[in-house]
Image (cartoon, helix red, strand yellow):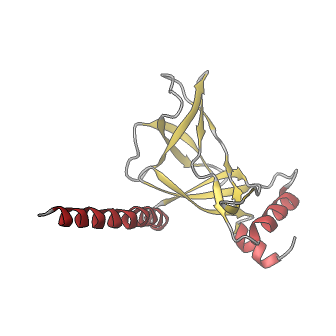
Amino acid sequence: MNRRHALLLCFALACAAQWLAPLWQVWRYENILRHGQVLKLACHAPDPYDPLRGRYLWVAIQPDEFPLKGNKLERSTQVCLRFKPGKDGLHEFDASVPGPANGELSLWLTVNYHWNDKLRVLWPQDRYYLNEDLAPKADAWLRQSFGGKDRKVIAQLRVLNGQAVLEDLICDGRSVAELVRRRGEP
C-alpha cells in the first residue's frame, strides 16, 4: 500500500467516524426511550433563554439529596442509585448499589458532594427542549398555574442499563407541551 492509499484510507475512516459518533448517540437515546423503564420524580421547570441552545425548560429534578452512610464519595465520581415506586405515584430513593441490575430501576448519577451522611447529586437530565414559541408560553403557564400551590410538575424519565433520558414533563397527568398547545396563550 503506497502513501496515497494510506491517506485515502485515513480520510475515509475519519469521515466514517464523524458520521458514526452522532448516529451512535441518537441510537442510544432512542433505544433508552423505546426499551427503558419509567421513572417519575418531582421537579421545577423555569424557562431560560440561551441564544446557542434556543428555548427550553430548565429541569431541576427533586430530590437531589439522598441519605447515604459509609465512605465519603469524592466530587464528580459516579454513584449508582436505585429507586422504588412511592405511594404518590412518584419514585423514591431506595439504596446505593454497585451497578444497575436487570429489572431494577437504577441509574448512574454524578456526586456533587457527600457530607454528614448526605449525598447531593447532579442530574444530567436538566433541559427539556420545546418549540421556540412554546417554551415561553409553557414557562408562563407553569408559573401561573403552579406558583404557590401544592401541585407538582413531574419529570418522566426512561431508564435503561443505568442511563436515563428525559422523556416528558407531566402536569395534572398530561404533557406540558400538549397542555400549552391546546391552551394557546396563557
Image quadrant assignment for residue 179: bottom right
Q: Please state which of residues 139 and 91 is positioned toward the viewer in this rendering.
A: 139
Where does residue 161 sit, x and y in percent of width and height? 41, 52
Query: Residue 94 or 179: which is nearer the viewer?
Result: 179
- On the rendered structure, is 78 left or right of 149? left
Report which quarter residue 38 is drawn in.
bottom right
- Residue at image x 75%, y 55%? 48
Left or right of residue 27, residue 129 in this image? right
Task: Examine the rendered structure and indicate whether residue 101 appears above or below residue 12.
Answer: above
**The C terminus is located in which quarter?**
bottom right
Q: Nearer the viewer, residue 88 or 116?
A: 116
Q: Residue at x 70, y 51 (%)?
A: 43
Query: Residue 8 falls in which quadrant of the image?
Result: bottom left
Where residue 164 sits in the image (x, y, percent)?
A: 51, 54
Numbered-mark total: 0
Residue at horizontal 61 percent and vertical 49 percent from the top: 86
Q: Position of residue 37 (x, y in %)?
A: 49, 59
Question: Which of 122/21 is in front?
Answer: 21
Residue positioned most to the front: 3
Whether 93 is drawn above or below 170: the answer is: above
Side of 88 where 183 appears, left or right: right
The residue drawn where x is 73% and y is 57% is: 153
Q: Is residue 148 above or below residue 179?
A: above
Viewport quadrant of the N terminus = bottom left
Q: Position of residue 60 (x, y in %)?
A: 69, 48
User: Left or right: 123 with respect to 162?
Assistant: right
